[in-house]
Image (cartoon, rainbow, N blue to C red):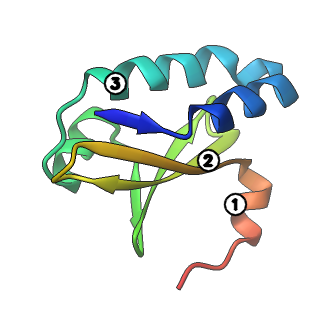
Amino acid sequence: MQIIGRDKVEAAYKKHSGWKASLTKWLAVVADAVWNNFMDIRQTYVSASQVGNYVIFNIANNEARLESIVNYVDKRVILTSVMTHKDYDKKVYK
C-alpha cells in the first residue's frame, strides 16, 4: 500500500519517543500489505476498527491511535492523525 502522510508518524514519535518502534513497524507492514477490504486489514491488525470513513489502528501497546482513510482501489493509506488514546477518546466521529 502507498502511505500518504508519513510526516505525521515522524512528528508523533518525535513527541512520544516510546512510540517510534511501533510506528516504524506499522509503516513497514502497511507498505508491504495488499488490502482489498477491511477484512484484509483485520487479518493483519486484529484490533483495527472501522469508524465511519476511517480505519483506526491501535499502536504502541494501546497508547496511541493512528487514524487513516484507506482507498482500497488505489491501494493508498492516507494518515490523517496519530494521537494518544486519551485524545482519541475525546474525538467525535460522524
Mark 3 or mark 2: which comes first in sequence?
Answer: 3
Q: Residues within 10 Å of mark 3 (few under 14, many from 20)?
A: some
Q: Quadrant of residue 46?
A: top left
Residue 51 locus on image (x, y percent): 44, 69
Viewer-proximal residue, 87 or 2?
2
Disc 3, SS: helix
Residue type marked 1: Tyr
Image-based side of 38 in relation to 2, left or right: left
Residue 93 locus on image (x, y percent): 57, 79
* Residue at which label 2 appears: 65
- Give the residue furthest to the bottom: 94
Q: Nearer the viewer, mark 1 or mark 3?
A: 3
Residue type marked 3: Ala
* Residue at which label 3 appears: 31
Mark 1 or mark 2: which comes first in sequence?
Answer: 2
Q: Is residue 39 above or below residue 2?
A: below
Residue placed at 69% from the left, 60% from the top? Answer: 88
Residue placed at 55% from the left, 17% from the top? Answer: 24
Q: Residues within 10 Å of mark 1 (few under 14, many from 20)?
A: some
Disc 2, SS: strand
Q: Quadrant of residue 89?
A: bottom right
Residue 43 locus on image (x, y percent): 21, 38
* Residue at which label 1 appears: 88
Residue type marked 2: Arg
